[in-house]
Amino acid sequence: MSQIEPTANVPPEQEPSTDFVVRLGAAQRAGGLIVPVLTAVLAFLAGGIVVAATGHNPWTAYKGIWEGAGFNWLFHIPWDTNTIHLSAFNLSQTLLTATTLILVGIAVAFPFRCGLFNIGGQGQYLVGLIVANWVGVSFASWPTLPHVLLGIGAATVAGAVWAGIAGFLKATTGAHEVISTIMLNWIAIWGGQYLFGQGGPLQNTYNPAAPESGTIAQSARIPVFWGNPVLQGLDYGFFVAIVALVLFWFILNRTTLGYEVRAVGFNPDAAAYGGINVRRKYIQAMAISGAFAGLAGALDMLGYLFQFGVLDVQASQIGFLGIAVALLGRNTAIGTGIAAFLFGGLLYGTTRGLNPNVFDPSLAGNLTSMIQGLIVLFVGADILILYVWNARRKLRPGRRGEAVVT
Amino acid sequence: MADQNVLELRGITKRYPGIVADDQVDFDLERGEVHALLGENGAGKSTLMNILYGLTRPDEGEILVGGKHMSFSSAKDAIEAGIGMVHQHFMLIPVMTVAENIVLGVEPVRDGVVLDERGAEERVRELSQQFGLSVDPTALVSSITVGQQQRVEILKALYRGAQILILDEPTAVLTPQEAGELFAIVRSLKEDGKSIIFISHKLNEVLEIADRITVLRRGKRIDTVPQKGATEEGLARMMVGRDVLLRVDKTPASPTDVALEVKGLNVVDERDLEKVRDVSFTVRTGEIVAIAGVDGNGQTELVEAITGLRPIESGTVAVGGNVLQGHVTPRTMIDAGVGHIPEDRHRRGLVLEFNLAENLALHDYDRPPDSKRGLLFPKALARRAARLIKEFDVRGGGPLTLARALSGGNQQKVVVAREVARNPVVLIAAQPTRGLDVGAIEYVHRRLVAERDEGHAILLVSLELDEVLSLADRILVMYEGRIVGEHAAGAGEEEIGLEMLGGRKQAVA
């Protein structure tokens, strides 16, 4: 029996939990907002040092990224029409990226709360994308609203089924979800290449030489509410993602399913003892997670992509970014939202949005990956950061004691 | 007298944010004595010993070993000063042999570099013969019993030249026989001139083994008394700060209907080993039936089978006259009216990261008033929690306090509150006082008797024979998966103890 003091104020040395999830839970409680913010700040600082080492001015580089992401629009002067136009466009693109990131972030965060690590966000996203494309190309005679809803619905279900397979395997055979979701990713990637490839069932009908999907009908496109539809404006899918965030919070905290998921995530033995069917929760949590990823694929396809090629399938990485988003957001709804906006800005602001005069675009792309990597690294190390934080507190009375004893 | 002291702690104070773990504590140890350090969980025993062993630095106070002032900054310093510590949780490497574990860090070497395996084994053998600590130096640590692992820890300390041994709650992990063997070892160490600090919160064993007893309460030294003349009642009063009823006050039972009937039950464990063999018994409303036995004789599996946590091979379980058939899950048993205080409240009884309101709803979250059509109402959960926290006198937090933040005794009160408040047909209490201190044990015992008097059936599973004898109206003894004896309340300790060790079976065979 570990000794537990009778007050709520437990001395730090008496928290000897070794279990990773328990430790993460403790870190989340104790760190609050400090640790994730510190994590992001540290990552940007380290990135800045590397920028400086390449002979660039980190301040200009970050300012360039800030403007490339369009965040300066939020603080623009109304009569300065010059910057409004470009920054508005940049911001709309950032939000478009954030839309996807919110959903693939939830797809990682939700199962994590059930003690599951979903690495299959990319595969579930692709499956949703493929199904949405198929629905969008077919049923061309339908009116817009039902066509869009059918596309979204079918892709969401497809994503749920795809992730549900991993949940089912975990529940019935004990197959680890990390392994099975990685394998399902590859099945989705190769499946997509086959379907969209030359002679594939979903290849376009107008150019047999191009290994690309068909273009979805006008009726399947989600209307744009900000910007020019021809220039890839921001569509209503953005609001769907915001609603998904609220839904994520609501399911977790205001439904019996969320209670069960959290109980299983914190302590599966106690959950089973309480009468919860743990295996069923694994399947449900994975399916719900896949639904969010599938939805992300649908919103991208019906919102601005409209068609997808074999090369796009190979190059797509956005589903994996969901892991970083969820980690930085600490698997909460609000955190996932904020992290998605941060990564959305970073992703767009260092690539197409970045002014080439400020920073060499070929270098900028690497800077993105670097900052992402650093954030994931620091998030992974936040237990370490917290440890240092606590050790500092622990040392203080020790030093005082030294002075008395000697 | 003073020059006999091998160790002296003067005015040790250690503060943590919001709490003073040790407040001006004095402690001394004579050569060749066993000095017990007695106190409830959180009284400051472990902090004091961590300071002595160099794991924590005191804020104030001095440490004298053999009359010399010491300042330990790590366990290494303490070991060099001749202090050895056997922790509650052993620090052994399971895949290495006993000898390898003992010499780890101070290995004897041959030709300058090669580990002298033979020499190590020889040295370990010598040591174990000298102190009567029988253990095979070539055995893998993973293959020996917990009692033997503890001996390895003691040998490890002796090998490093310890003159002062700290034993931190050494009997917590031992069976009664192993505890007896440990006491014999402690006596032989004492005769050899070693000095021993024996940390415990169990009154009877402290009285059995110690020469002097120091009692700590809330970080303060209350008193140091010689073993002669000390009584359990007196020590308990010093520990808790008030009179404690060590014996449970209860009237004879008046059992009525059968609440739980187990017939011909067979259960296997994960490795398909038979753990429960053809067990049949009944528990009636208004009585406490206790299952006594040494740990690992099938009690855990029996409880898990009755509560739906483990599948039944053959046999039946009936609750309130209804035989439960088909696919039995924990949910089935909960709905049938089985309440269960699990043996490990951290592993099963509580979700430590959940608040009290959520923990208290663990069986009822999916029905009104907690929820409706899948929607959860946190306010309803909090209302129940506020009521139960008051009714069951849970201290240290409110409905929104995390279970982790409570003391062990209060955590157990939360579990008891949840199970009792559901008004179960039969309440299964598996080691309900494990790891609790005297005050909390008294509370749990009184509560169980009160539940019995209110007309509930109670099945108590306990490894503590004292607990069984003081609570039970009927006693079943379990040995190697079978019920080997049944006794009425007031049966002799000797007879039951013998059956627990398989004595009667041997007599028959």
Image (tube, coloured by chain):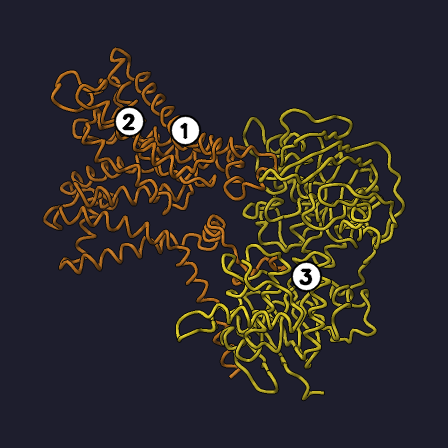
Q: Quadrant of the N terminus of chain A?
A: bottom right
Q: Secondary structure at mark 3?
A: loop
Of residue A39 and residue A173, the one placed in the foreground of this image is A173
Chain identifier for the yellow-coloured part of the image: B
- Residue pointed to by mark 2: A129
- Residue pointed to by mark 3: B171
Residue B287 position, x and y percent, is: 83, 40
- Residue pointed to by mark 1: A165
Circle 2: residue type: Leu
Of residue B11 and residue A248, the one placed in the foreground of this image is B11
Circle 3/circle 1 CB separation < 8 Å: no
Q: Secondary structure at mark 1?
A: helix
The answer for which chain carries disc 2 is A
Circle 3: residue type: Thr
Q: Residue at x 51, y 84 (%)?
A: A406
Q: Earlier in the sequence, mark 1 or mark 2?
A: 2
Q: Residue at x 34, y 36 (%)?
A: A182
Give how far apart the Cα atoms at labels 1 and 2 are. 18 Å
**Does residue A215 appear to the left or right of B397 in the view shown?**
left
Residue A251 position, x and y percent, is: 48, 33
Which label lies toward us, 3 or 2? 3
